[in-house]
Every structure is written in C-alpha cells, then in structure tokens.
Image (tube, rainbow, N blue to C red):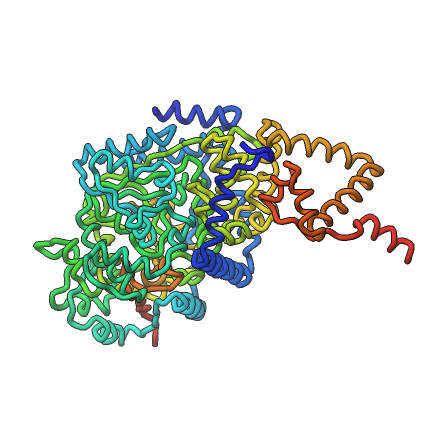
Amino acid sequence: MSGLGLHDAFLDRARHALGQEHLKQAVRRTTDRLRDGRAAASAEAGAFEAWRDALSEARRRAIGRLDVVLQAWQVRAEARGVLVHHAVDAREACDIVVGIARAKGARLAAKGKSMLSEEIELNQALEAACVEALETDLGEWIIQLAGERPSHIILPVVHKPRGEIRELFERHGGEPLSDETRVLAGYARERLRAEFLRAELGVTGCNMAIAETGSIALFSNEGNGRMVSTLPRTHVALMGVERIVETLADFAHLVRLLPRSATGQRVTTYVNVLSGPARPGELDGPEELHVVVVDAGRTAQLAERDYRDALACVRCGACLNACPVYSAVGGHAYGTVYPGPIGAVIEPLYARDDERRAELAEASSLCGACHEACPVRIPLHDMLVRLRQDNARRGRGGATALALQRIAARAMAVPFVYDAAGRIGRRAARLAAGGGQLGRWALGSAPVVRELLRRRALPDVPIRSFRELWDELEEER
Amino acid sequence: MEAQAFLARVSAALGGASAPWTPPDTRAAPSAPRRRIELLHLHAEFASHLAKVGGTAELVPASQAAARAMELLGDGPRVHVGLELLPACVRAVVARGAAIGPDSDPLDWRAACAEAEWGVTDAVQLVAETGSTLSCATARRPRAASLLPRRHMVVAPLSRLVADLDEALTHLADAPSQWLLVTGPSRTSDIENDLTIGVHGPGVMHVLVVDEDEA
C-alpha cells in the first residue's frame, strides 16, 4: 500500500484504458447513446418521477422484510412445481447447478445473460465438471469467444470493434465473413440456433422475482433468454437473494423503469414471467424449473444499515452511463464483475474485501450523477463517501494521507491558521506550476507531493483565495 | 443450505424476524366493456408504440380478415396455437394446407416451429401503453409458436385492447406457467451500438387486430 492509500491496480488499469483511443471512443459513444435514450424516455413519460418513487418504495419495502417476502415467494413457487435451492456462497451455488447438470446427464448448458453467473464464475465450474457452458446473448457469446469479461452490465461488449468480432467469428466458423452487423448477427443466429435445440440444460439469471405469484421474470431483447428457458428440458435460474418485489403491481413499475433506465426503451422486446415448469398437456417449456437463491455476501450487506439501500439495485446500468469516471475509462478498469458506481459500492461489500473497498471508493468524482440517474434513487455518492470514511477509520487511508487529513482538520478549525496555510500553499503550488524546472524539482522532491502529483494533475492555482475576493466584494458594496 | 436456516440468516441480518406477510388483494373487479370509440383510440396508441420498435399492427374488419391473413401468410410452412383461440373469421385460412397446430397428428412440435415461416398466435391482451401483446402458456397455446418461426403473427379481436400495464397485470394473479409480453421483433445492439432486427427470435412481428363489430 502506498503512502496516500490509493492502490495502483485501478489507476494502472484506468491509465491503460485512457491510452486506447478506440476503447475511449466506443465507451463514450455507448454511454452517450444510452444516457440520451434514458433522458428522452424520462422526458416523454409524464409520470417518470412518480414511477421512480413507487419503484424505490416497492424495492425498499420488499428488502425491509426480505425474510417473509422470500418465504411467501417460495411457498407459491413450490406450489407451482418450482424446485427452490439456497446457496450461501458462490461455491455452494456452483455446486448446486453442477449437481443438477450431472443428475440430468447434461453435456451442454445454454446460458442466457446473467451477471450473477459471472459473479459466481459458474462457467468455470461447469467446464470443470465436463459440461460445456455456452453463452447465447450475442454480446456475451462474443466475450466468451474472446476469453474476456463483460465491460458493461447490459452491453457487455461495448469495448470491442466490429473488425475484432468478425475475426472471432471467422476463427470460430472457419469461413470468411463481412463486417456488416447483419452478417455478423446472422452468423450468431444460425450457429446458436442449433445449440438451443441441442442443450439439455438452460441457465438464466432472474431480473426480479414476484412474491405474490411465486414467479421469476426475465427481460430480454434478443430472445435468447426465451430460448434457453423454453427449449431445454431443464431450466435453472440463478436469483440474487435481494431480487424480489412483493406484488404484480410493484412489478408493473419495474417493467416501466428497467428498460427506460437501461436503454431508453419503453419496454424490452420480451418480458418473460415464469411460474413453474410446463404443466401437464403443454407441448413445450421445461419439465423442471430450478431456482437457486444466492446470498454470496448480500445478507451481510443487508445487516449494514448504511449500505442496505444498495440492495434495491435493479441492474439497469444507468449509473454507469451517467458516471464521468466510467465514461472515460470503461468497465474493465474497475477489475470487478460489476463496474461503475454501483460496482464500487456493492462489490467490495459482497466480497468483504477491504482492499477493494479502499481502492474503488476513490474511483469516483462524487458528482452525484449516479444518484440522479438511478431508477430506485440509491444514494451511491453518499455511500462512496461513507466507504472512504470507513477506510480512514480502518487505517486503510494510508499513514501519510491520514496525517495530512488530521493537520488539515486542525487548520480548518481555526480561521487564522487556515488563512496562513492557504497563502503558503498557493505560493508553493504556483512555484511548482510556473516556477520552471527548479520550482518543480524543489516541490517534487518532497515525497508527499511527489505521491500526489503521480496521481492527480495539479489544478491552476488562483492568485487570491475566495475569502480574499469575498472581502473585496464586500468593500465594493 | 436448508431453506429454514437460510431464511433465518436473512432474518438475523434484518435485526429480527419480520411480521408475517399478507398477500395483497390485487384482483380487479370485472370492469364494464369499453365502448368502441375508446377501443379505437387504444388501438391507435397501441399501433404507434409498436411501430416505434419495428413491429406493425393493422385494424381489419372481420369481413376482410381472412383475405388479409391469406395475403400475409402465403403458402410457406406455418404453425399455430389452438384454432379455437383465434377469431372465427381467420381459422380456415390459418389451418389450410400444411399448417401444424396442437391437434396435428403425428406431431413433432419443436421441429415444426423451427421450420415454420410464420407462427400464428392469439393474444390475451393488447397493451396500448407499450404496444405489447400479452400471451399465457397453456396446453392449447404452446410457447415456441411465437419464438422459433421466422415471423410472428398475432391475431386478436379489438376488444382485447387494454389501456396500460396495471390493467393487463391484474389478469395474471392466477399465474399461468408462463406469461409473456412481446413488443416488436427480436433485436440487438451489441455490435458497436448498431441495431439489428431478428437475432434469435422472429424478425417480423405483425398484429392483425380484427374489428368484429364493424357495421
């Protein structure tokens, strides 16, 4: 750990990302498009703010009595034939899914897009058990062929230019293709269609469960989520323990807000709600529907009152698109499954990882754009400040930074000292910025300052302070 | 982990077990049928929202529905839901030739759907707010008819239009094994934000709204 308490991992990855011109432009173009879409959708819909209020309330209500809501959901789901499993951590969740795959003699598991499956690293667990795990969301499939991780919650492949995608497909199929989107998507349709029909197991996430009817809901645009939950004989859905609303009326608000917040769509192409496997007489649909309810650090977060609200997240990605840091560096710089502001808050809490807590809490400008974009009004920027406070309290801030902060706190408490320190500081900074090599050398030789300059650009330093200017204005009046 | 132990962990994290949960009473009282003029307004709204996402809807008088369906469906392979679910005026047209439905014998349903040019289904409701069709899986209404064929046609009477999602969802408290909102053709923007239609599901979605009361 360095003197100022910032880890180098995020900074290094961020610097690396900033050096890649294509990545920068692609991420910026995508976040701009999604943000504009959301803005248009919220302006067009008269009741947008009222829906946000309603969904925020519904999510917090369900989480505030999660135990009984989960139980109510389970009773109803089981009554309709759902096989419900519970997993405390990632390993148990993987074991359960692998166990089902083995029991069914499955060789191929076709997967819908699921961030939870990324989180628990299910693909690796299935492959280890000799079950092929195939991603079928177009973006996720590309990521899988490239051997990478998603860089955005809803658009996993924003960082990849079409030329690279064509090369991946050509290597996969052994025949030349063109760069046209239609051709590339057509190749995926043809190749994956055969796999949907062959897979014995379908694996999906769960955007939200509905307690009232014991259901799980899947939102998608491509239709692959419908394929893997309709065609294989066994369907396994992974559900984060917090992903539940109480009623169909609550769910209606999610149908309105999740697509709008994510892409600006009024509704996704498919909203698919499942209550049990196919019933007697039905010609298709799975014979068995398993739902694995996964904790993996979420109840620990539930117990932390300061951060409980983050469990209300509906995984729309709006905070990523609104975030100036994410827009600049993209998802991979975070080094987490969930990038962006929401990732910086939930991931260290899920993982009980203090190092990451320290690192990612700094990866924010605290501008609050994430809070404004959030459909359930999670105060992400407040939580990031609190995480920084926790870091300082745990001594995770680094000794030098802590000492500097203590001195600053003392100085700010006494106006006379604050004034004097300001005067000296401004002189020194100007010397460093405009004083030529000598000045920079003189200042840069101080270890603390060297540390600072390595991480941050020095701002332009005004000649007079705000307080001095204020005094002058007072006199002019 | 056992369910009870798992839920006990959740209770502990909440600071103690919560009071028992009571289900809400969301079942709506049956409402009076809408007047024709209201339904026509709702259809206009429905069609306009569906058009924005690349789907199409048209209102046809019952007397012309068969001719229009024939024109659209052509002679290609076709699958359909139980005929009794469709408006009477189009049944013969949908069933003609080599069409395959739940009553066909012998029946390889999945293969038939995968080869079909058109899948013809009904809709429980048409939701004006979003331009969505709502369907519920049953023995007579298998799921793959709207999933595997290259094109999807929905045929439903004008009277199935409802204003919004709240109204549509009140009909689902009895939870069929699957209910589904479909709004337009399958799409993706995964490749460089470039929108493509028809990636996994049908690339065409057409809704034939049949006006049975037309004088």
A344 shown above or below A142: above
Quadrant housing the C terminus of chain A: bottom right
Residue in the foreground of this view, choosing between A334 and A320: A334
Query: Residue B165 at x, y = what percent?
Result: 43, 55
Please say whether residue B59 is visible from this viewpoint. Answer: yes
- Residue A369 vs residue A423: left or right? left
The residue at the point 20 percent across, 33 percent down is A102
B7 shown above or below B38: above
Quarter of the image where one finds residue A295: top left
Query: Residue A236 at x, y = what percent?
Result: 28, 39
- Residue A169 vs residue A1: left or right? left
The residue at the point 39 percent across, 36 percent down is A73
Query: Residue A337 at x, y = what percent?
Result: 42, 41
Quarter of the image where one finds residue A399: top right
A140 shown above or below A181: above
Residue in the foreground of this view, choosing between B25 and A299: A299
**Direction left: furthest residue:** B106
Residue in the foreground of this view, choosing between A206 and A473: A473
The mark total stands at: 0
A61 shown above or below A326: above
The residue at the point 18 percent across, 53 percent down is A194
Residue in the foreground of this view, choosing between B182 and A454: A454
The residue at the point 19 percent across, 65 percent down is B117
- Residue A245 vs residue A280: left or right? right
Query: Residue A292 at x, y = what percent?
Result: 33, 35
Please say whether residue A214 is visible from this viewpoint. Answer: no
